Amino acid sequence: MTKTVLIVDDEPNIVLSVAFLMKREGHTVLTASDGQEALETLAATSPDLMILDVMMPRKNGFEVCSEVRVNADPRIARMPILMLTAKGREAEMKKGLSLGADAYITKPFSTHELVAKVNELLARSSTADAQA
């Protein structure tokens, strides 16, 4: 079954690379170039997973993650969030995870690690939905 992945990053080359990887895995891809656009996309669609950068204009990834988890529409409340960011200090990782991110990968990243983590989160999410 095809899954929809929302990629949120203000760096076009990252978006292109990650979109290519996700499409190669058979996923449908949506993109947003900043946090505010991500929230607007989430209001209009129900992706199965979001890959989220931290440092972006308008709203950063921490703000987006927090808004999704705290004020979440039930359609996206349990959607897995994978933070993919250059913010790699332990305190930043802890912050992302404490705000509700399901995984945290730092840039530069291994494409194999990213694909494996996305597939793991999607499988876990599908299992949780089936049990709900």
Image (cartoon, rainbow, N blue to C red):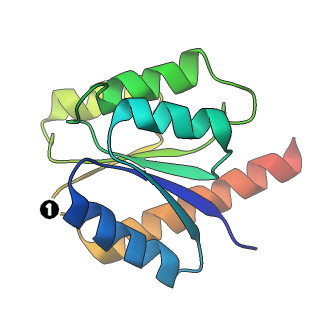
Residue 99 location in percent, x, y?
A: 42, 23
Q: Against 33, is 110 above or below?
A: below
Report the quarter where the C terminus lies. top right
Tag 1 secondary structure: loop
Q: What residue type is labelled 1?
A: Pro
Q: Looking at the rendering, which quadrant does residue 94 occupy? A: top left
Residue 7 location in percent, x, y?
A: 42, 54
Would you name the residue on which mark 1 appears?
A: 108
Q: Against 78, is 71 above or below?
A: above
In this image, 37 relative to 17: left or right?
A: right
Report the quarter where the N terminus lies. bottom right
User: Residue drawn at (60%, 15%), measured in percent from left and top?
Assistant: 71
In this image, 108 relative to 123: left or right?
A: left
Q: Looking at the rendering, which quadrant does residue 2 occupy? A: bottom right
126 or 60, nearer to the observer: 60
User: Residue drawn at (31%, 62%), measured in percent from left and top?
Assistant: 15
Return the residue found at the far top.
Answer: 71
Question: Local crowd at mark 1 within 10 Å, few (<14), some, or many (≥20)?
Answer: few
